Amino acid sequence: MSKFVSINKGALALQLRLPQVGMPEIMSFTNTPPKASGDANEPSILGTIERSSRINGMDSAVPNAVLLPLGGMGFFGWPAITGHRMGQTFILQFANWQVEEADQKTHLHAQDDIAKIGLTITLQAFASGVIGVSTRLSNHGEADYLLERCMAGSFPIPAGKVEVTGYHGMWGREFHSFTEPLGEGLWMRQNRRGRTSHDCPPTLFIDHQAMQFAVSLGWSGNHQIVIDKLDDGRRLLHAGEVLEPGEVILAPGERYQSPTLYAGADTKAFHSFVRDDLVAWPTGQMAPRPVTLNTWEGNYFDHRIEDLKSQASAAASLGIERFVLDDGWFGERDDDTTSLGDWDIDPRKYPQGLAPLIDHVTGLGMEFGIWLEPEMTNPASKLMTAHPDWVLQVDGRSHLLSRNQLVLDLSRKEVHDYLFDKIDTLLSAHAISYIKWDMNRDLTQVGGANGRAATSAQTRAVYALMDRIRAAHPKVEIESCSSGGGRVDFGVLARTHRVWASDCTDALDRLDIQHGITGFLPPELVGAHVSASPNHQTGRRHSLAFRAIVAMAYHFGVELNPQTLAPEEQQELAHYIAVHKRLRNLLHKPGASFHHPPLDGRYVWGAGDKSRIALFIAQGPQMMAEQPAPVVVETPDAASNDGLWRIAAVHPAHPAFSRISDAQRKLLEGDIEFPLSDLARTGLPLPMMQPESAVLLEIEHVKGGPSNG
């Protein structure tokens, strides 16, 4: 008799049937679970009816919609697991499924007695409604098993028209959304860059008339998402690692553990999952995100300790709360050609070490952070002179440099221990509360010490080093930076506390980048900084108001030397920092944020609760319309408190409007009160804004509704 398993704790519900032989059959996968408690766990009567195939098909129909379908036994689609023993034992068929409940997870165990391969599929439902699935494959035989492919999991998509939305881009242009329809053939996106990538992050949104959901793979290495059309018109989505030839050879008794594939109903579910279940904060809960000064664009490699102290003093006077010393403090690091891997303080720049600077920063009441790039080295370094064999390489192949860097093989114990000792010594000797962990190149010639492909081992070794450092220094936060947004995923975020969305700090480009990344990450984890004008990446000139407002709703920071600002600019920046701090608990409140799709070059985002709304509006390019459409806003919490509302503050005081009517002026001055339902139904009739300008409106509840009735 078949066993049934149900996984649901929110918007998504997955029901499986475990057959005597074969893979778990997906009975249902919906984002509208049954209303009656317990119904979701009842076996589907209709799902147990055996289906017949076409006349020219198999005599006994083989289920198609299964978790991790396998080839060679009647399924003719894309197999989710493949492997062999030197060309033999190339077919798998699992049987005798057993269910184990442990640690709030459901483990499905099965065995192929002929191939002598064991399989465990682990499923977990989170309070956010997100479902996680991962796979473990074990070699119980007496010979090696060459694993070619093992996806983390599968989710079904109903038959009919389907659109998928994902992200593409490049360095400095990350997280740009694309939407395309699925056709008749196999749909696949692969990344082989050895990190999450700027152009192909492993997150995808599925839009079908009857079902909408999103998936994201928790993995920072090579990966793929595949959507296969089944014989009955439905589709199966799979995601997991991309394994290079010969990369995973399981000796007898060894096993392979996949990353975890997560499925959520929508952006809100992913935000809740990241906040509540993924990110592990040093104190158990997130403290207010400190306004940060990062020294990179203000100094580059030019480190002069007295000038840095002066910058720290200027930063503190602006209200900045964290000072991060970027690249250039170690070895003989005067440019990017040397010293990566030599993690000793440069005595030329810091003759008394880092302590005088750190003491000055912490004495001003700020936290101190530091930049590291542990995975990389330069050919011109003491480390490479001593240990040229420590880099990833393939015998007989010349090294391929990127940004003058080679990649250390972190899977080697001696490399791992060397890096841990250097970082542990640095953190133990200084009051450092934050690491900006960078990783600035794609991986090539990824050969390990045994000569085999090692991308998977390298990714796991990076995780292991992060885990070891966090265990030794649990109060230290880590930022994931990878030449900007090249390593942003749910795998690295289980070990870090913030991501750097892009090396591009141009406010105009950041509108799309930040809109895209908040599709799956909450805004408080996304670093967004005010940088200099003209911008160092694009050369564009923007007002300080535009630069600040575009960055304010996220993990706010500054990427310039504050001493270069004119007095009036310092005063203006201090104003925006103060406004951010005043609104921070609203902007980063769980469930409060919203982001609307851009319309005619206008971007709208913000946050709201029952008493106030912070509404950000930015105009990118010139509008095409003769008049701008009213700004319609639906806020998650505010809707329960209608009553009357008004605009209480406008930043900047004089926005860059093209033309304004008397009634619009009265609206902006707070003289017109309106019900919240008008904001959601009719919208704010705001004036047209000039291109590359922005405004922040603070809207407050004034009377009526449950708070002030």
Image (tube, helix red, strand yellow):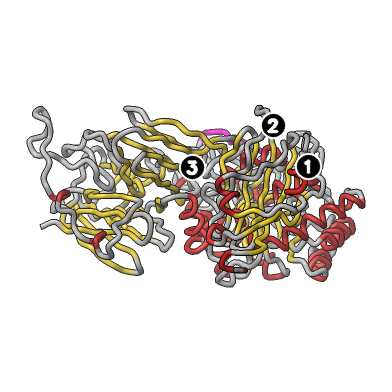
Q: Amino acid at mark 1?
A: Asp
Bin the neighbour count of mark 2 within 10 Å (Cα to Cα): few under 14, some 14-19, many 20 and up. some
Front one among 643 and 461: 643
Q: Report the predominant secondary structure element of the magenta stretch.
A: loop
Q: Is residue 403 left or right of residue 95?
A: right
Bin the neighbour count of mark 1 within 10 Å (Cα to Cα): few under 14, some 14-19, many 20 and up. few
Q: Earlier in the sequence, mark 2 or mark 1?
A: 2
Front one among 68 and 443: 68
- Which tag is nearer the camera, tag 1 or tag 3? 1
Q: Earlier in the sequence, mark 1 or mark 3?
A: 3
| SS of the residue under disc 1 | helix
Q: Residue furthest right?
A: 567
Q: Are marks 1 and 3 in contact (CB under 8 Å)?
A: no
What's drawn in magenta, residue-wise? Answer: 396-403
In percent of width and height, residue 382 lies at 70, 50
For residue 237, what is the image quadrant? Answer: top left
Residue linked to disc 1:
662
Which of the labelled discs sits on residue 447, or is there none? 3
| SS of the residue under disc 2 | loop
Q: Amino acid at mark 2?
A: Pro
Above-or-below relation of 545 to 275:
above
Above-or-below relation of 412 to 65:
below
In space, the residues marked 1 and 3 are separated at their CA atoms by 69 Å
Front one among 631 and 325: 631
In percent of width and height, residue 616 lies at 67, 48
Query: What is the quadrant of the C terminus in the image?
Result: bottom right
Which of the labelled discs sits on residue 621, or is there none? 2
